[in-house]
Image (tube, rainbow, N blue to C red):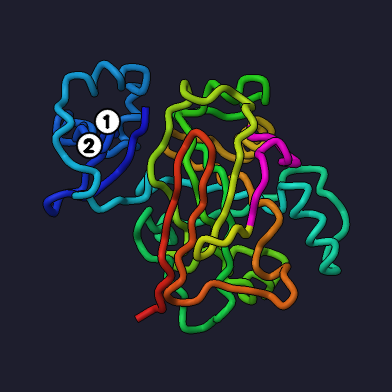
Amino acid sequence: MKLLSFEYAGRASWGAVIGDQVADLGRAFPQYPTLQSYLAAGRLGQVQADAATVPADIALSAIRYLPVITQPEKIVCAIRNYHDHHREVVAAGLDRELSAFPPIFLRTWRSQTAHDAPIVRPHCSESLDWEGELAVVIGKTGRNIPAAQAHEYIAGYSIYNDASIREWQFHAKAIAAGKNFEDTGAFGPWMVTADEIAPDRPLALETRLNGEVMQRTRTDDMIFSVAQQIEYASTIFTLVPGDVIVTGTPGGVGWSKKPPRFMVPGDVVEVEIEAIGVLRNRIEQAA
């Protein structure tokens, strides 16, 4: 099942996608006003039965998409987690060593934007880069989760464009400065529940800029698997429902090209992941 967060008629809600319509579960179950609160209540296993009681009476074309989880407690992002991306980093003369542990940083929820919403290029930079990534939404609370049990904690899968302000990323070894500008982390269009995608199933991922393919890979090229990332992150802090694991980008980012290529206002960037869908954003200049 596809679950999404959205705004309709001036009201924020969440619901299930049924064909080209939406069943407004936030309206039907006001005690769970957000998808995150529904996950926290442990009701995901009942979502199909709940959705069956709600009419799908809102057209997808009529909603304004919101980030799938609008205010996650944590957005845990992996750095250099594909073999082909590691190779292009080495080719650029940067660190040659593969990490022994998953390198991570945190995004803030205010840095997010939604499907069909702008990714905003700030005035301080012209190096806005794309990073198409698989996102994992956590469905239940866990600490010190063994990798072998990690999939029990996954609510579903989505798409992220971890758009980066490159020179700010490289101000220091800690790269979070370039990863947290507002309206740069695109997240959507929806979450596909974990029962729809088998654990460790390799998924095709493609990023396109104005229709031109920039990145193309399969998720089995990851250096650290989804399960390993969950194990590592949950060793550091308790994972809670609605937390998001953004699993790293493959090769083909703009700064690696010769000459480097970045997104400019007017561009349209799309990230497509097999079995999930297409995340689409236009690029706008900050006001």
Please name whichever residue, 66 or 265, is drawn nearer the observer in this view of the structure.
Answer: 265
In the rendered view, does 227 fall on the left or right side of 68? right
**Bounds of the magenta segment:** 215-226
In the rendered view, does 271 fall on the left or right side of 72? right
Q: Check the picture and name the quadrant holding the N terminus.
A: top left
Amino acid type of the residue tagged 2 in the rendering:
Gln
| Mark 2 Cα shell of 10 Å, populated few (<14), some (14-19), many (≥20) | some
Q: Do the residues labelled 2 and 1 touch (CB within 8 Å)?
A: yes
Residue shown at the point (46%, 83%) measured from the top left: 123
Secondary structure of the residue carrying tag 1 is strand
> What label does residue 18 carry, if any?
1
Secondary structure of the residue carrying tag 2 is strand
Please name whichever residue, 145 or 264, is drawn nearer the observer in this view of the structure.
Answer: 264
Residue shown at the point (29%, 34%) measured from the top left: 17
Counting from the top left corner in percent of width and height, residue 166 is at: 63, 72
- Residue carrying label 2: 21
Q: Place residue 282 in its image quadrant.
A: bottom left
Counting from the top left corner in percent of width and height, residue 196 is at: 47, 23
In the rendered view, does 14 fall on the left or right side of 232? left
Q: Can residue 140 be seen in this view?
A: no
Q: Is residue 32 magenta?
A: no
